[in-house]
Image: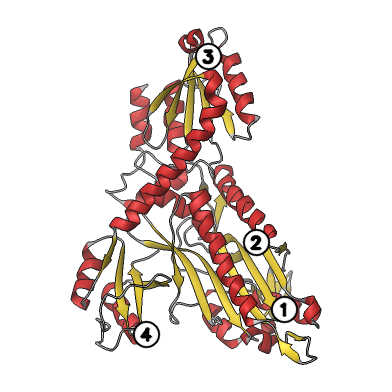
Amino acid sequence: MNNQKDKLVKSITSRDEDFAQWYTDVCRKAELMDYTEAKGFIIYRPYGYAIWENIQANLDRDFKRTGHENVYMPLVIPESLFMKEAEHVAGFAPETAIVTIGGKEVLQERLIIRPTSEVLFCDHYSKIVSSYRDLPKKYNQWCSVVRWEKTTRPFLRGSEFLWQEGHTIHATEKEAKEEVLGMLDIYNNLGRDLLAIPFVLGKKTDKEKFAGAEETYSIEALMHDGKALQSGTTHYFGTGFAKHFNITFQDRDGVLKPVYQTSWGLSTRLIGAIIMVHGDDSGLVLPPYVAPIQTVIIPIQAHKEGVIQAAESVKKTLESLNIRVKLDDSDKTPGWKFSEYEMKGVPLRIEIGPRDLETGECIVVKRIDNQKIKMKIEELSQRIPELFASIHQEMYNHALQNVTENTRAAKTYEEFKTLISTKPGYVKMMWCGHQECEIKIKEDTTATSRCIPFVQEHITDECPVCGRKAEKMVFFAKAY
């Protein structure tokens, strides 16, 4: 039994030995995804897709609670429409896939496979809005997009990925800006309450903001290897798109005005974040509320009288509490099952055998620390939900500690370069607001500005890169 477990666990590369290979091993061996013959296009296997479904369900509930409606836009965009917003096109042109032939006919107008859907929403809004009474429009779509990436990695960066993209229009600037920050809060709450991931929130610099946006905000997560991952963004467009696409409305004063517009998006790269923030050398470690299987029941000596019946009874009890539970009554050895569900990151394992039945007890094992808890079977319905809550908080606190311990401040540019090159995580530094300093930082260190946090600190009076007066404190990091 132990040899089987050792063999299975050793098939995953150690994180500290080769983090990139560890990540790939977990993606494949935990059956989250598989590769296809088309580079950058992956298969979301049932276990991986179930994680996305749980994220989707949580967000969709919050979207609808805040008055948003789901729609679906076409997969393709006529090139003439795509070219209508020049700044937007400049940002995405290098990443677009283009359809040139339909059947056997060369298309008279090429079709862009959507890299994002701003222009589709704009075109639609221009046709359905005429009065202030039509506003706001708060739409969201769940779909996939295609961006022709040169370097791909499962979930983190693909030629195709799944996401949600919200697009809203409003009568006033105030309302649109409230929308942008409100959606950022929803994303932040998702990290705190479902994923057990603490995000750093803030505004993107002009260099890093979305093409066509006046303001971009992001949630940033810190991975185990010290790199940052942009995990979601919200954008305030002002009236830029509206003027290009003639999205106007007659206001209460009778004057024709352009709408104020936003967009916001979050993708399956969150699955990558879950893997890299919480995983260990044995595989996945899933937060309880996002885990496809929250509890697995392993019968011990299943052939003995009453064991399977007791396991089935426990399963029914937990299911009645809406707990996602699996009873593995296959003929594989208990040791193999222990290793399998450990690698898949199942938060809790319940072991029930003949000796347990004699005392009305079972063994509950926590994935995060392999702690074994002897528990009365009749207490499971109360204690399992309590364990979920404590495990989730413990995972969040551990991730928050990682962020806190790996966030450092630099007062000089030499100190900044030393910290970025020798220490994992974020480096906080003052910045003058000029893009040439950001460019120099990236050229010298490969680090980029992640965001200008809402909570500002005053570290130095000058920008350490150029010596000009500092305007903002910025989080910098190497990133995925």
Task: Decide which of 240, 383 is in the foreground and name it.
Answer: 383
The residue under label 2 is: 143
Task: Decide which of 179, 59 is in the foreground and name it.
Answer: 179
Report, in whole angstroms, how far the alpha carbon at label 2 lies from the one at label 1: 25 Å
Asked whether residue 24 is in view, the answer is no
Mark in front: 3 vs 1:
3
Report, in whole angstroms, how far the alpha carbon at label 2 lies from the one at label 4: 36 Å
Quarter the N terminus occupies: top left
Side (left or right) of 374 relative to 314 = left
Color theme of the render: secondary structure
Does the CB distance between marks 2 and 4 fall below 8 Å?
A: no
Mark in front: 2 vs 1:
2
Quarter the C terminus occupies: bottom left
Side (left or right) of 7 relative to 254 = left
Report, in whole angstroms, how far the alpha carbon at label 4 lies from the one at label 3: 67 Å
- What is the x, y in percent for residue 42? 54, 54
The amino acid at mark 3 is Ala
- What is the x, y in percent for residue 471? 35, 83
The residue under label 3 is: 302
N-terminal-most mark, 4 or 3: 3
N-terminal-most mark, 4 or 1: 1
N-terminal-most mark, 3 or 1: 1
N-terminal-most mark, 2 or 1: 1
The amino acid at mark 4 is Gly
The residue under label 4 is: 433
- The residue under the point 46% across, 54% down is 272
The residue under label 1 is: 107
The amino acid at mark 1 is Leu
Report, in whole angstroms, how far the alpha carbon at label 2 lies from the one at label 3: 44 Å
